[in-house]
Image: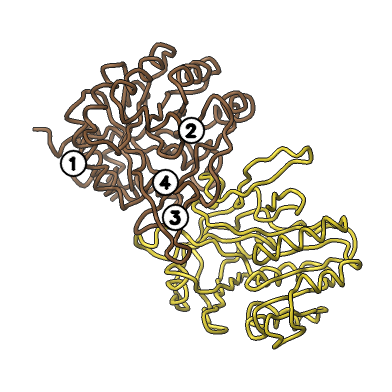
Chain colours: A yellow, B brown
Amino acid sequence: MGRLLKATVLANDQVLSGIYKLVLAQEWLAGEAKPGQFLNIRVSGASAPLLRRPLSIHYATGNQVEVLFQVVGEGTKLLSQVKPGEVLDVQGPLGNGFELNGKGPAILVGGGMGIAPLVFLAARLREPICLLGSRNGQLLSSSGGARLQEMGLELQIATDDGSLGRKGLVTELLEQTIDKAGRIYTCGPKVMLREVARLAIEHNIPCQVSLEEHMACGVGACLGCVCQTKTVQGDKRHSRVCTDGPVFEAREVVWE
Amino acid sequence: MNRKDDQAVKLAVNLGGIFLRNPVTTSSGTYGFGQEYAAYLPPSELGAIALKGLTREPKSGNQMPRLAETPSGMLNSIGLQNPGIEKFIADYLPQVRELPTKIIANISGNSVDDYADVAGRLEAAGGIDGIEINISCPNVKHGGIQFGTNPLMAAQVTKAVRDNTKLPVIVKLSPNVTDVTEIARAVVDAGADALSLINTLLGMAIDIKTRKPVLANIMGGLSGPAVKPVAVRMVWQVAQAVKVPILGMGGILTAADALEFILAGATAVAIGTGNFVNPAAPHEVVAGIEAYCLDNGIKDVNELIGAAWRR
């Protein structure tokens, strides 16, 4: 269960144009955080932008929590201007996070900024294979690719422009590697997630997907961030991405 | 020296027969069934919690996207997603009943009969301290706001609920009308014990990249600080038009916001969208109202109700 916390900014560095790494000092949060969970960060003391910004946890260790984010609008722009020493109003950790236990080799499939939360996940799994995709090599490295490489993990890379790894889609890498997988973890753009889920279901491999939605409360109260899910019997319902997720089993999600 | 030691402020208020320990509540649809925020704020600090809107049948709600952030506000179009009254009573009410605060159930329907039935079942189940009739939801196709913009229909719904329960009945008014006092008088005449206002203002946003409405439901309800001046104005008007107590809401984030509503004539206030921004807001508002009273020599918060117009 999350808490309302004060977190001191230790660093907030631009790692690539428009991408920032925010490092927060928050011992309790660092101890509680699980891979796949997120924080709801207040970006303005005034009434605009009004809502907190939900951002996934990139890494947590000791008393530090890291968030890697891309400037996409007014809220993330304000967050990019936060300076070391400032104190942020942070709510978290929120969401269910990834289930770490499972059988067989773990394959991580990350696309774009969806690579960021997989860094924390990779650190808690035993030698996962990481399949990473992005627009280009620079973006891929800056969104977590370089960090995963430093961890000494096996990486397979695909980029849209071929500037790093092979030219193509990360899901093509998955098609070639999927026979080795005991379980799959994935985060990234919806089209990629859908294809990863399709392949996993086809090969009957457990697959945890981390979804993203615009959120308001982040605690399951407002029902603003739902996705459609189905039960084993096929009954459809709206589940809350913030509290029922953001991690769902691929089979649960209604993908069309 | 701590002033609290030598002089306590009376914060308790009577909202049409619901006795609140303090005038700060949370508004329907922003606080789930009261469990979601329990880790952030002890429910015992709240005057009351208004539950997420309930309907006779389960509702899966509207398609995504359901949210759009707007200047100092947000649009929502949830569509009254809820498990339905039967499942609520079986699966949720047992925990809701245990919450150490007053519980206001918010109800919606497609027909007058729906409202009366749900109200009756809630009273029979026990553990509910008051019923809030939602005749002002802008996000459902049938019922909801239709009942809230027509004085005759609003009165019919109110009377049907009134006749089917002994619980205090609050009617939640829509701001999407020309003259809010007309509806207010109609529902008070039909037996409402209190009024809550305002529900959200009908609005919309368009994504200029896709050239399509942001919300799947096209239109949604605007809430947050952006609507506060409209809400204060309507509370001011209604408070002078009727004799029943008012639960004021619309964009409250701070004690200063809440005090505006009380001075305009609200007996109690509700924090809605403000909870998303700051889950500690209700706590801060209670403390701020108390501090304001101490600073201004007010012994009882009831002295402030409508003070902006009362002689």
- Residue denoted by label 1: B297
Q: Are marks 3 and 1 on the same chain?
A: yes
C-alpha gap between disc 3 and disc 1 = 51 Å
Spot the residue most to the bottom. Answer: A163
Q: Amino acid at mark 3?
A: Pro
Q: Amino acid at mark 1?
A: Gly
Few, some or many C-alpha atoms within 10 Å of disc 2 (few <14, some 14-19, many ≥20)? many
Q: Which circle's residue, 2 or 3, is located before the other in the chain?
A: 2
Query: What percent of the width, then of the height, locates residue B106?
Result: 45, 29
Q: Disc number at residue B20?
A: none
Q: Amino acid at mark 2?
A: Gly
Check disc 3 and report its element: helix, strand or loop: strand
Q: Residue at x 47, y 76 (%)?
A: A80
Pointer 2 chain: B
- Residue denoted by label 2: B53
Of residues A95 and B22, the one drawn nearer to the viewer in this rendering: A95
Pointer 3 chain: B
Q: Which circle's residue, 2 or 4, is located before the other in the chain?
A: 2
